[in-house]
Amino acid sequence: MAATDESRPLPPGWAGWRQNLLSPAALRRHVVWLLAASASGLGAYFFHYVDDLSEETRRWMMGISPLLPAGVVSVSLLLICPLRDRVFPGTDGTGIPQTIAALRVPHGPGRDPVLSMRILVGKMLLLVLGLFAGPTMGREGPSVHVGACALYLSTRFADFQHHLVQRGLILAGGAAGIAAAFNTPIAGAVFAFEEIGRSFEKNNAGTIVRTAVVACLVNLVFLGDYYFYGVVDVDLVTVEQWLLVPVIGAVGGLLGGGFAQGVVTANRRLRPLRASHPHLLALGLGLGLGVLGLLSSGLSYGSGYTAARSILMDAQSYPVWLAPAVAAGNFITLLSGIPGGLFDPSLTTGAALGQATSPLLPFFDPQALVLLWMVSYFSGVVQSPITAFVILVEMTGAHGMVLPLSAAALVAYETSHLVCRTSLYESLADAFLAEIEKPAK
C-alpha cells in the first residue's frame, strides 16, 4: 500500500485523535505494526534458542572427538556460501551493513535485494546452518536484518506515514533486533540512531523505541526478565584505577580498529577471488576455521558467549590465547560473508583481554577491568561508542561503571579512527551497494 501523505494536517481536537488512533485505517496500521514488531522479537528468540541448541550439539561432538566439529566447520562453507549466492543473494554477512544500505535506496522495488521475504527466510535459514556448523559468529546482526525486513514488509499490509516508510520502520526493525537479542531496549534504540541511521530522527523516535520495547517484551514471555551476562556490582574507587581508563580505552580502540580495518582491506582484496573461485575460497576459509578450532581446543567455535560470561561472572581462567583465537575466528567468518554477527565475538575478545591483563594489575577489580576491556575493544571494532557503553550497562546492570565505561568507549572510538577511518559497517554497506548495483550498469 502507498504511504499516507504526511503533508495533510490532522483535524483539530478529538477529530484528529480519532483519525490518527481510532479510524479503521489507523487501527489496521497499529495492528500490522504490532505484529511486525512481535515477529522481530520472535526472530531474535528463535536465534537465541538455536544458538543454545547448537552449543549443546557442539559439546556432544567434542565429546566424541575434536575432529568431528573441526570437520563439520571445515566443509560447512561449501554448503552455506553457494546457498547464499545462488538461492538467497543479498543475505551476506552480519545484516547490519545491509540494513544501512537499505536506507540509501528509495522505497520501491530497488529495496527488494536488501529487504524482502526471500531475504528474511534466507537469513534465518543460513544463520541456523552457520550456528550449527560452528564458525565464530554471533546472532545479533542477522536479528537486525530480520527485524528490518519484518517491519519494512509491514508496509504491504497497511498505510504508514511517509517518514516511516522511507526510514522509520527500517530503523525500528534494526533497533528491535539488537534489543531483543540482548534484552537491551535502550541500546537497541541508541544503535538505530547512532550506527544504522547515523542521525537522531525525532519523527521516527517514538516508533523506534516502541518497537524495541515490544520485541523485548516478546522475549520476556519465553525467557523472563534477565541480564545478558548477569548482575555486576562494581565501580572504580582509586585514582590509579581511573588513570588506567583512557589507557585501556586507547589500546582496546587500536586493537578493535585494527581488526575492523583488517576486515575491510581483506574483504576488498578477496572480492575478485570470491567471484572467480568461490568454492576454493569457501573451502580455504572453512579449513582455516577447522584448524583454528583444533588448535584452540574448540574455544574458537560459536559466539564465545559462554567464555565471556564465565570470565566476567565466575572469574573462570582461560588460556591467554583465547582473545586472538576468537578474533581470528571471527575475522575468517566475516571474510566468508556468511550470515553471522560480530557483537558477541568482539565482546568475548574484550573479556579475554581483560582476563589476560588482570594479573598485571592486582589493584584493579577483575570485573571492572574486564568490563573496560570489553567496552574498549567493542567500541573500537564497531565505532559506536554510545551503544558500546549503554549495551554493557544494560547487559550487566553495572550502573557504578557508567562513567568509566563511557570514557573508555569514547577514547576507544577516537583511537580506532587512527587506523580505520571509515567504520566497518559503513565500509561493508558501501561494498554491498556496489555489488547489487553492478547488474544495473
Image (cartoon, rainbow, N blue to C red):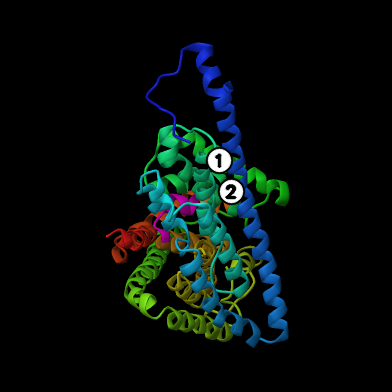
Q: What residue type is labelled 1?
A: Thr
Q: Where is residue 78 in the image (x, y as percent from the top left)?
A: 52, 79
**What residue is drawn where x is 65% and y is 85%?**
68
The image's mark for residue 40 is: 2
**What residue is drawn where x is 36% and y is 60%?**
436
> Which quadrant is home to the C terminus?
bottom left
> Which one is closest to the eye, mark 2 or mark 1?
2
Mark 1 crowdedness (10 Å alpha carbons): few <14, some 14-19, many ≥20: many
Callouts 2 and 1 close, C-beta under 8 Å: yes
Q: Position of residue 230 (x, y in %)?
A: 65, 56
The image's mark for residue 211 is: 1
Instruction: Using the image, determine if residue 33 lies above or below residue 272.
Output: above
Q: What stretch is highlighted in magenta?
A: 382-390
All told, the count of numbered labels is: 2
Q: What residue type is labelled 2?
A: Ser
Instruction: Using the image, determine if residue 310 lies above or below residue 109.
Output: below
Residue 11 horizontal side relative to residue 318, left or right: left
Q: Which quadrant holds residue 52?
A: bottom right
